[in-house]
Image (cartoon, rainbow, N blue to C red):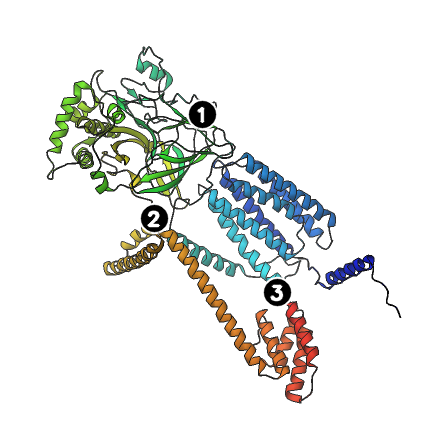
Amino acid sequence: MVSPISTPNNSSQDLSSSWRQRLSALPPSVPEDSIALRVLVQCLVTVGIGSLSVAASGVTDTSVWNLLAIPLSAAGAYWSWRSRRRRNIAAKFLIAVGMLLALAFFLGRMVSIPGDTRIVLAELLIHLQVLHSFDLPRRKDLGYSMMIGLILVGVAATISQTLLFGPFLLLFLLLSLPVLVLDYRSRLGLLNWRQMSVGISLRQFGSIIAVVVTLGLLIFIAMPRFPGYQLQTFPVSGSIDVTGEANSREIFNPGYVRRGNNNTGNADEEQEGSGVSPEDGPGRINPDFYYGFNRRINQNLRGELEPQVVMRVRSQRAGFWRVMAFDNYTGQGWEASRGDELAELRRSPLSYRFLPITPQPIGRNEEVVQTYTMVQDFQNLVPVLYTPHSVYFPADELAMDPEGALRPSGLLPEGLTYTIVSRVPVRDIQRLNQSSTEYNGSIRQHYLQVPDDIRDRIRTETERWLATSEEPLNTPYEKATFLAQILRDNYTLQTELPYFEEDEDLVSAFLFKYTGGTRDQFSTVLTVMLRSIGIPARLATGFGTGQFNPFTGFYIVRNTDAYALTEVYFPEHGWFYFNPIPDGLLFSPDDSGANPFSVLRQLWRILVGVLPAPVAQFIRRGFQVLMFVIGTVLRFLSRFSGRGLLSALWYLVGFTGLSFLGWLMVQGWRRWQRRLKLSRLAPMEQIYQQMLWILAQQGYGKRASQTPLEYAAGLQQRPDFRQGSLVRQIIDRYICWRYGGQTVDVDGLQTRLQELRRSGR
């Protein structure tokens, strides 16, 4: 008989039939019926969306339309529950189209906003969650929604700069615990769709919450607080364009009177009428704006600032957030004499990164990343830490004056975020003492200026103080340090200082008449004293470190943190700060990084007052030994690559990889030993032992106290185990062979064993 010829049509039909048979053989999709689980999962998603919106408000670019995702997602979840047993082919098609549109919108946002991408990615996740909420038939789909809620809360934690995020985090915890309980009960098949209770008592739930919160707080206290981070794409307010509100060649400080060129009129009357301060002569400071951020500053002003938060700073180390510097001393203040000589900086159209043309320190330095968020409107000046290496700022152009101050063409609005990468030189005293005293012409011309009528008198007084040193002072660094300490120890802060006369010199009055002055006048006096003995110096104004919040990782900077420091120039090393103000650190705060264990240190100070002295001393010594061991290990590892903590991280990754390979080898050895033992057993015994091992891997292990029949009966009674009859057949054949001496169909049992193995995948 001639066999029929196979045609392409027949082949395609056979292939289609084979695929249909395979699909029909797949286990049916079991929908999730629990209303309680679905409602709580939806609450988790709602908390995630709400926390992101609250955390991003006033910090980074976001849209209030994101809150519309809450009712849309809830509507989708309700429709999905009603349609959980249908195929919903049309809905799946529309969801796929919607996801493509969301992807296109996401890519468009990425191109138009090349700044901080966290919020853009989070918004994409919100859009996908809204679409996903219309297709939640199974428990696995609800698990995806749970993960989306968790990710949104995590993103909100990285964006949040205030403690408003705390209640959302606690609410997410309160919801996640019953969700996990319900999810586990659903996996076991113990969850009825009408059941609205979690399955645990309120007392048990409260105990679990207390334990989790306590452990979380203990871990939180012990965790290092690194206020900075290592990123290559930095946060920038992409939708805020700082242009058009102020002229980039004119610094706008609303605290000063603008008189024009004639300089006429009564300063007091102008101040009374406008609420601002005169640029020359006696007057009161504006209580809202620090006087030191202006082209020309007047130090014959009196009064106090009203505390207001200006900005929040996230930085890898504490520092002096520098705004301006001045080269020309006017007798009662300072002036940036070259304020019109601005260098224009431009950025790439694909990035917000500016590269200032500034000399970088040749000695040992550290890269410090800072992100600034303006809490209120600020002047057209950009606070930075030291000389910036890279600037990520939302503007088309920036200007930089010869003193290193950055000026955008517009004011800095509330909510603006930008990032600075600085190369901060390390204060190496030995190298600075060896620095040359040969200064170039530009440095001599601009940073050694002292009025002729006071030069000799100030130099004589400065040399008199230097002569009081017990050890000879041979270098500019030693002299600058000694003079700063002299001013701190021998002159007093005076907040109610009388106004200077019209022709009275500030430095002379400070040294010879009042023996003290206001905070910023200390820095002015040190600057002029150094200049009088041939050491280049200038006055720099900016903000102090501020108050570090260990819970958010941000420095809270207020207008009252603003003050002036003295910058001293060392050839080939750059400018270094010296602080002569009595109530501050002698050197700039950027010389001491933030303490990562600040919360732990505060807790330790409390315990020291409670614990007995021997116990506290024992704990302190133990901690010192632990830190010594860790430091020794890190130094040993860094010797191989010279990259410090980064090399230690690579070694840790390598050690983890080797440990994993070792674990795989041990598991392989155990499998080989098990197969070797099985090969020595009878065929039926092999099948029985393999069945026990497969079930143990699936989480249905046999207890030693159970007989085979008891074990089989227990599995048949479990609602989450669907292969109870198959296990019972294998065990019955095993008992007949073991205790009855009957022959068994080994090949047929091998087939059933393979079915049991596949059912667990």
State if disc 3 and disc 2 touch (CB < 8 Å). no
**Label 2, label 3: how far apart the Cα atoms are:** 45 Å
Q: Which residue is mark 2?
A: 598
Q: Which mark is residue 548?
A: none
**Label 3, label 1: how far apart the Cα atoms are:** 62 Å
State if disc 1 and disc 3 touch (CB < 8 Å). no
Residue 705 appears in the rendering: no
Numbered disc in front, either 2 or 3: 2
Spot the residue most to the right.
1
- Residue shown at 26% from the left, 27% from the top: 443
Amino acid, disc 3:
Leu
Image location of residue 584, percent across then percent down: 25, 37
Q: Earlier in the sequence, mark 1 or mark 2?
A: 1
Circle 2 residues within 10 Å: few <14, some 14–19, many ≥20: some
Look at the numbered disc 2 and give the secondary structure of its residue.
helix
Q: Which residue is mark 3?
A: 188
- Residue shown at 70% from the left, 82% from the top: 745
Circle 1 residues within 10 Å: few <14, some 14–19, many ≥20: many
**Label 1, label 2: how far apart the Cα atoms are:** 37 Å
Image location of residue 655, percent across then percent down: 42, 61
In the image, is 648 to the left or to the right of 514? right
Image location of residue 414, percent across then percent down: 45, 31
In the image, is 327 to the left or to the right of 133? left
Q: Which residue is mark 1?
A: 410
- Residue shown at 25% from the left, 25% from the top: 441
Q: Nearer the viewer, residue 360 or 241?
A: 360
Q: Nearer the viewer, residue 273 or 630?
A: 630
